[in-house]
Amino acid sequence: MPKDLGKEFSSVVDRAYMQYKKDLERFRKVGEIMTRNVVTIDPEASMEQAAQIMGEKHIGSLIVKKYDTPVGIVTERDLLSKVLAEGKDPRKTKIETEMSYPLVTIPSTLKIKEAAQTMIKKKGRLAVFDGGALVGVVTASDLIRSLPQQPETLVPIDDFMTKQIKTASEATPVANIVKIMGKERIGSVIITRKEEPVGIFTERDLLTTFLAKGKSLKKTAGEACSSPLISIPSGISVHKAAYTMASKHIRRLPIKKNNDLVGIVTARDLVEAYAAQ
């Protein structure tokens, strides 16, 4: 790229980034950043039905309603750790036995930072109510897309990353990857080729590619993982990591230092970093 074009491209990126930061300033209350299209399910439904709905809609949770009253939430992690990892049949397992409850609720007028603190304290997604009615859901992804431009988001991400990374060869069957994630209660595994990281397999990949379509888990991780691997350099700020996740529509970012994989950060890690400052 010619030198002058390189400068022009850099300038465009900088301007876009500054505009992105300005846009974030208007997000002050939960009601402005929550997901409004709340998808619900009956507690008598099966975990297989829940998996199909989440996979088809590309979402990670469903609010469980009984007699039109929200009573709990079922998530992709519930499906992975409580059902698949335990060898239970999703077709025969009812949601009411595996859902997370009680439902963590917040008002739509709650400040974003307070919502972040509640999410970390309660360790779950947040159901948003207004006047006694369910009006939305707030996830870690919702929060990182709307992190206010505050000094605390400029701290380095390294202190919040997970240093213990699970990896598996591209030849590993997806069924084995699922067992690893369920046993370790993690949402992703880095996939390698000749010991070099080439992709990532996540809970969302499991839902959308396999469970929602009824596909066999015998496929190899190399065929099923998301590739090429998107990563960030060590030392990057929480704010820029959040921007990368939001712009790339991902929830996990491997971290590299001198081309070596040194950690991984999730959307929840970013929320925790913001809430802790």
Image (cartoon, helix red, strand yellow):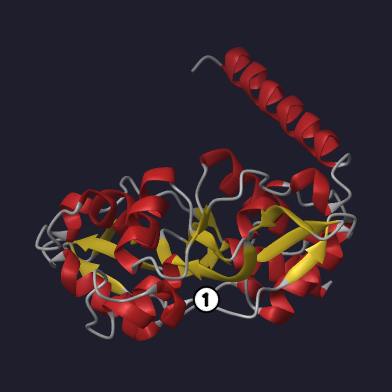
- Report the quarter where the C terminus lies: bottom right
> Splitting the image into 4 quarters, where does residue 200 fall?
bottom left
* Residue 116 position within the rendered picture, expressed as x and y whole percent measured from the top left: 76, 66
Q: Residue at x 13, y 67 (%)?
A: 172
Q: Residue at x 22, y 52 (%)?
A: 224
Q: In the image, 64: left or right of 203?
A: right
> Splitting the image into 4 quarters, where does residue 246 fall?
top right
Q: Residue at x 65, y 57 (%)?
A: 236
Q: Amino acid at mark 1?
A: Thr
* Residue 72 position within the rendered picture, expressed as x and y whole percent measured from the top left: 59, 72
Q: Depth check: give the residue in front, 11 or 15.
A: 15
Q: Secondary structure at mark 1?
A: loop
Q: Depth check: give the residue in front, 271 or 156.
A: 271
Query: In this rendering, is residue 209 above or below 200?
Result: above
Q: Residue at x 43, y 49 (%)?
A: 230
Residue behind mark 1: 162
> Splitting the image into 4 quarters, where does residue 143 fall?
bottom right
* Residue 215 position within the rendered picture, expressed as x and y whole percent measured from the top left: 15, 54
Query: In this rendering, is residue 26 above or below 276?
Result: above
